[in-house]
Image: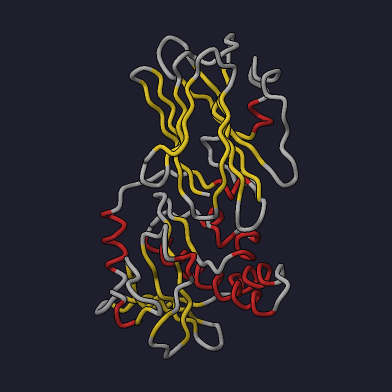
Amino acid sequence: MEMNIEQLTFTTSLIQKYHKMAQQFGQQHLTAAKSAQVYENTLAVLAVNYYCQCLGIPTQLTASDSWNPVMQSLLDIADLQLGNGGKIECLPVQVEADCVEVPPEALSERIGYIAVEINPSRTQARLLGFAEKISSNPFPLSQFQGLECFIDCLHSKPSTQRIHLSQWLHHCWDARWKRVEELLEVPQLELALQFRTTQTAVKGGKLLDLNSTGDSVALLVGIKPTNPPEMDIWVEVYPIGEQTHLPRDLQVMVLDSSQVSVMQAQARSTKNIQLNFSGEPGDQFSIKLELGDVSVTEAFII
């Protein structure tokens, strides 16, 4: 490991463990070009992940889209999910390159970009610098700043807690959500929720207390791949406990990434509420439940 203090960079060895993981991912894809792309992306992500570990920056490596074989096949991604909910793109570049081409799918939903120079023998990776925004494509490496700017950026970004729905398809669950099979063990839910997940669809949920008088509901969210990269998303709200109907005047809204309501429904004499829509990997949305002066919002990214 080597650090350059003047313009902060970071050099680390690409150990055998990294190559083994990159090879395992690469072999899951049909074409040589896709396999090579995934191999390089994986090495870049592992190098940045190690750098974060050295600095004590929490990461969620397995929650990254780059760690999802389905996302690898659909997109050119080298993202690393950070513990604060943000995401950085780890851009592999060749030695002596003067610019880097940023894939279209990586131009949004990122708090920044780290250029990772991988030597021809793939024995070392050098983190060249950090860019918070990509203003042109290809983007000149000369416009990347020192890695200290990455650290400054982390300190300035608010923490987010978005649930990554695509990870549910690969059995990666946030601790705050449960698989539907677990929720079916809750009294009064077994009869209400007559569904099971399938090989191509998965559904999770959580119980929400809406006020101190015992009005509680089960919020369920499902995801199913349809026409890649499109995903079907559905939202369901059910009463729990001894209630057979949802609390009257309960409002359920789907908000876009700007927190604008794009779908909504209100309970009257309603047994459940269901909302359906579709999206693509990287799309963000929130689900907001309102009852009187109580409001609960859950944030998601596909």
Front-most of 47 and 236?
236
Residue 97, compared with residue 281, is above or below; it is below
Residue 161 rendering spot, x and y as whole percentages: 42, 43
Front-most of 6 and 40?
40
Q: Residue at x 57, y 17 (%)?
A: 239
Q: Quadrant of residue 299?
A: top left
Residue 244, compared with residue 23, is above or below; it is above
Residue 217, compared with residue 300, is above or below; it is above
Left or right, 77 with respect to 136, comes to right
Image quarter hosting the N terminus? bottom left
Front-most of 293 and 266?
266
Front-most of 254 and 36?
254
Q: Residue at x 50, y 86 (%)?
A: 119
Left or right, 25 with respect to 13, comes to right
Residue 59 rendering spot, x and y as whole percentages: 45, 55
* Residue occupying the far bottom of the picture: 96
Residue 301 rendering spot, x and y as whole percentages: 49, 48
- Color encoding of the figure: secondary structure
Count every numbered label the image shows and give the total: 0
Residue 63 rendering spot, x and y as whole percentages: 54, 53
Left or right, 45 with respect to 130, comes to right
